[in-house]
Amino acid sequence: MHIEPGIVEGPKIILSYLTAGGAGLCGAYAAWQLIKERGISALMMRTAATTALVFTFFQVFPHYPVGVSEVHLILGSTLFLLFGVAPAAIGLASGLLIQGLFFAPFDLPQYGMNITTLLVPLFALQLVANRVIAPHTPYVALRYRQALALSTTYQAGIVTWVAFWALYGEGFSGQAVASLATFGAAYMTVIIIEPLADLGVLAAAKGLHRMKDSALLNSRLLNPA
């Protein structure tokens, strides 16, 4: 989902700073809520875990340039289920920044766009989770339909934001629309993989009963809300 350099340039890129700032405020609020509930140590431990995982997703897992962006297996819904929305958001922002600073400095000018593209769908995923998962249901009890709803929300959100940035920067030219169609078709195939990954991780997590009260994991993972 990295926006290719040159798609949004000049004064237009200011919008990405504004949208990223808004997403950052939402993430900060979620982080403050977690600190109040579980303490700062929970936020720090989970953030360290999500940052390491996100860096692995971006830098180690296979990723391919397609159309206006790249196709990555980000597993945003997996991060949300295991660690919660705030650690997932901070981990996505931190992992992407580390990759940019040390491995892909050409992506840094697009950082605001990329952060918006990653975080806004994550917050939408949280809203969907509250609707499709019944109260008092631990996440390890999710069914495929629910995991698919979460994954679809996240991946569709990413595709939508990539489309917005591409059309915002390049306009509705035939080439831009064709590149977007190619990217969207390729990226939505991730929906086939991510729900299965979620269910596999949740199945493994069922054996972590001794960690049901651990500050490292989302309390909703093993416990009813």
Image: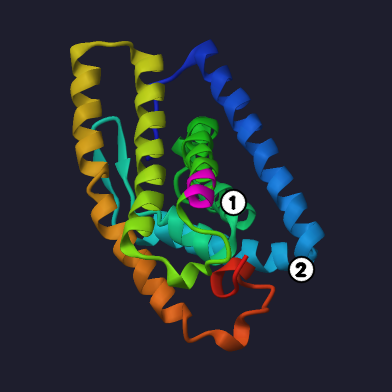
The amino acid type found where label 1 is placed reads Ser
Front tag of 2 and 1: 2
Rendered image quadrant of residue 65 = top left
Residue at 24%, 32% in the rendered image: 67
In terms of secondary structure, where does tag 1 sit? Answer: helix
183 on left or right of 74: left
Disc 1: which residue: 94
Whether residue 35 is visible, yes or no, is yes
Residue 115 drawn at (x, y percent) = 53, 38
Q: Is residue 187 above or below residue 8?
A: below
Query: Where's the N terminus, which quadrant?
Result: top left
Query: Where's the C terminus, which quadrant?
Result: bottom right
Magenta residues span 127-131
| Residue count near mark 2 (Cα–Cα under 10 Å), binned few <14, some 14–19, many ≥20 | few
Whether residue 218 is visible, yes or no, is no
Q: Is residue 4 above or below residue 48?
A: above
Disc 2: which residue: 41
Rendered image quadrant of residue 165 = top left
Question: Which mark sits nearer the N-terminus, 2 or 1?
Answer: 2
Residue 191 drawn at (x, y percent) = 28, 51
Residue 138 drawn at (x, y percent) = 53, 69
The amino acid type found where label 2 is placed reads Ser
In terms of secondary structure, where does tag 2 sit? Answer: helix
Residue at 27%, 59% in the rendered image: 193
The residue lying toward the viewer, choosing from 224 and 102, is: 224
Does 174 lie within the magenta span? no
Residue 52 drawn at (x, y percent) = 53, 64
The residue lying toward the viewer, choosing from 208 and 164, is: 208
Main secondary structure along the magenta-highlighted residues: helix
Residue at 47%, 81% in the rendered image: 206
> Badges 2 and 1: C-beta atoms under 8 Å apart?
no
